[in-house]
Image (tube, helix red, strand yellow):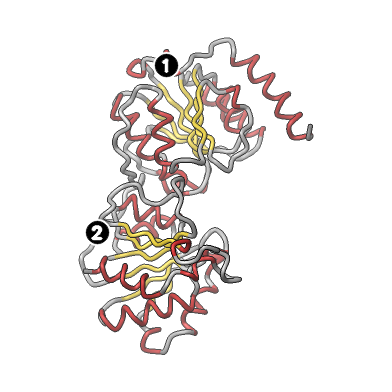
């Protein structure tokens, strides 16, 4: 047995000794009588957006319930001003900080802890010290399945999309989970109908899923011929700023003048406002795709493999077109730079044109 497994086994013993004093399974809870719930999601932006339908389902079922969000500081700008969240606490991924925040939460006597996406054991330690009677967790497909016996109910991911798994989790409390619509938690500047603005994200969480610069250049050229008035807006993280240089280098001066480079230059609030005012966003599977979904902005998204568990938009199918590299090549590893290179540029252009029309 590895040292990690030994540590988790020992930790599980102590957590269960502590929790067994007042554990309650979700089927024995009358959610309408629950006063305080802690919802935990301290992962990336997209992962938080995936749980927004479940958060709304909780508040719709019991408008007077107090929802306290436990998340990371990097999500602060994302959830400020959310109408469904009554309070926010922040936690780092460390045992010391999880104990600190758990003891702080214990002062408000939360009855229920719901972990949508967070790294174990820190999330479960925090909820144990918070003293919740019922603890339920969604384990993502690629997450280590540790401390399961410390939870009162779980949903194991890896088969269905995260939005559906999060709804299944709160569904165990008897709340209505029919609505899969994500929302953007913070206030965002309203949509504008001025001009044709196409967003392009070149980067992704891994270089093998980047939107290849040479393909993006061909898309810009083709779209510009049919919609000469359009502007193209590049978005992405600061560490992707070099990608814009590659795109500028692949275009002539006339087309380069149509490009506005926002990569690494916006706050999260500014990024959301940009996406809200795009006519359409072309992007790989990224947090920006999920922002666009939550804001009901049209998208053309590029995925490597078609699979049931993928994080493709689960709402507004008329707004979102998805192209899969695996539909064009049986072996998706066809390029040293990106697995998306097997998607024909013509199909990306056609999907974007449909969205613009």
Secondary structure type for disc 1: helix
**Who is closer to the viewer here, 169 or 110?**
169
Secondary structure type for disc 2: loop
Looking at the image, do the residues carrying marks 1 and 2 touch, with CB atoms under 8 Å apart? no
Q: Residue at x 44, y 41 (%)?
A: 160
Q: Earlier in the sequence, mark 1 or mark 2?
A: 1
Quadrant of the rendering where the C terminus is positioned = bottom left
Quadrant of the rendering where the N terminus is positioned = top right
Residue 349, compared with residue 107, is above or below; it is: below
**Who is closer to the viewer here, 348 or 288?**
348
The percent position of residue 249, horizontal first and vertical second, equals 49, 84
The percent position of residue 247, horizontal first and vertical second, equals 47, 79
Q: Quadrant of residue 185?
A: top left
Q: For the residue carrying disc 2, how many other residues have a C-alpha within 10 Å: few (<14), some (14-19), or many (20+)?
A: some
| Labels 1, 2: front one | 1
Residue of label 2: 191
The circle drawn on residue 149 is: none
Gap in Å between the C-alphas at discs 1 and 2?
42 Å
Q: For the residue carrying disc 1, how many other residues have a C-alpha within 10 Å: few (<14), some (14-19), or many (20+)?
A: few
The percent position of residue 233, horizontal first and vertical second, equals 38, 71
Residue 60, compared with residue 117, is above or below; it is: above
**Who is closer to the viewer here, 80 or 256?**
256
Q: Is residue 156 left or right of residue 298?
A: right
Residue of label 1: 27
């Amino acid at each position: 047995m590895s040292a990690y497994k030994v540590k988790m086994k020992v930790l599980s013993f102590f957590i269960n000794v502590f929790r067994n004093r007042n554990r309650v399974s979700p089927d024995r809870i009358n959610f309408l009588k629950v006063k305080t719930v802690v919802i935990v999601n301290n992962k990336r932006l997209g992962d938080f957006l995936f749980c927004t339908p479940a958060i709304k389902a909780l508040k719709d079922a019991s408008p007077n319930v107090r929802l306290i969000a436990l998340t990371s500081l990097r999500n602060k700008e994302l959830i400020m001003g959310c109408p469904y969240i009554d309070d926010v606490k922040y936690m780092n991924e460390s045992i010391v900080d999880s104990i600190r925040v758990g003891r702080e939460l214990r002062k408000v006597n939360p009855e229920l802890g719901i972990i949508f996406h967070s790294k174990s054991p820190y999330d479960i330690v925090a909820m144990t010290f918070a003293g919740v009677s019922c603890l339920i967790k969604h384990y993502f497909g690629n997450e280590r399945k540790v401390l399961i016996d410390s939870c009162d109910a779980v949903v194991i991911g890896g088969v269905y999309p995260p939005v559906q798994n999060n709804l299944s989790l709160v569904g165990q409390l008897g709340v209505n989970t029919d609505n899969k619509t994500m929302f953007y938690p913070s206030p965002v500047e309203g949509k504008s109908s001025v001009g044709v603005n196409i967003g392009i994200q070149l980067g992704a969480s891994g270089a093998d899923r980047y939107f290849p610069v040479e393909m993006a250049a061909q898309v810009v050229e083709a779209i510009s011929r049919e919609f000469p008035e359009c502007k193209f807006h590049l978005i992405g993280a600061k560490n992707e700023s070099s990608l814009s240089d590659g795109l500028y280098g692949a275009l002539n001066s006339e087309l380069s003048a149509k490009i506005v480079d926002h990569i690494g230059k916006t706050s999260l609030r500014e990024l959301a406002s940009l996406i809200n005012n795009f006519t359409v966003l072309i992007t790989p599977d990224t947090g920006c795709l999920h922002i666009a979904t939550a804001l009901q902005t049209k998208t053309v998204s590029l995925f490597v493999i078609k699979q049931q568990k993928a994080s493709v938009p689960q709402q507004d199918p008329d707004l979102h077109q998805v192209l899969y590299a695996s539909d064009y090549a049986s072996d998706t590893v066809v390029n040293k730079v990106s697995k998306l290179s097997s998607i024909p540029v013509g199909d990306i252009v056609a999907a974007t044109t449909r969205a613009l029309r």
